Image (spheres, helix red, strand yellow):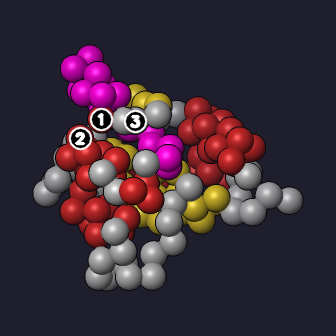
Amino acid sequence: MSRFIEVLLVEDSPADVRIAEEAIVDAGVNVNLHVVNDGEAAVRYLTQQAPYKNATAPDIVLLDLNMPKMNGHDVLDEIRNQNNMKEVPIVLLTASESCDDVEKAHNLGINYYLRKPVQGPCLGELLSAVQSLWH
């Protein structure tokens, strides 16, 4: 059996967090899901600042684009500037219809994006692929 993959979900919508949790269960993927609710908390988690000093490094980051305090583009820029985070797959979750939002995210280093509302099977397949490819 594959080890659990560590997933950091950066999402401010409780409904979207529930969708992700259900998709993980339905996919049968071995996942430790860590959730933070805004961009500033995501940066603190990824840089192991309080209250996340013992946080486990994620194998993949699921990143909402539109969040309070710090948007997904800014978080993405911070993530990609961390030496230990350059190779971590990042999936942008967005309800934006703007091609510019996705293009800017690609330029900042996302690996993939999913339009919201995220379909459970699609997220489950993505996490299964991560588990197969990286573990």
* Residue 94 belongs to magenta span: yes
Q: Residue at x 86, y 59 (%)?
A: 1
Circle on res. 90: none
Residue under the image location 68 percent in, 47 percent down: 134
- Could you say which is closer to the camera, residue 67 or residue 131? 131
Name the residue nearer the viewer: 1 or 86: 86
Pinpoint residue 53: horizontal percent, then vertical percent.
38, 82
SS state under label 1: helix
Asked whether the residues under the numbered discs 1 and 2 touch, taking CB atoms below 8 Å apart as contact, a structural biologist would say yes
> Which callout, 1 or 2, points to the residue nearer the camera?
1
Q: Which residue is mark 1?
A: 108
User: Closer to the N terminus: mark 3 or mark 2?
Assistant: 2
- Label 3, residues with CA under 10 Å away: few <14, some 14-19, many ≥20: many
Mark 2, Cα crowd under 10 Å, few <14 / some 14-19 / many 20+, is many
Q: Is residue 100 magenta?
A: yes
Marks 1 and 2, the one that precedes in the sequence: 2
- Residue lying farthest top? 99
Q: Residue at x 47, y 31 (%)?
A: 112
The residue that disc 2 covers is 73
Contact? badges 3 and 2 (CB < 8 Å): no
Tell whether label 1 touches label 3 (CB within 8 Å). yes
- Is 20 left, or right, of 24 in this rendering? left
Task: Report x, y in % for residue 114.
Answer: 44, 31
Which residue is disc 3 drawn over?
110
Give the CA separation, mark 3 to mark 1.
Answer: 6 Å
Distance in Å between CA atoms under marks 1 and 2: 7 Å
**Which range is magenta?**
87-107
- Secondary structure under the numbered disc 2 in the rendered image: helix
Residue 46 appears in which quarter of the rendering?
bottom left
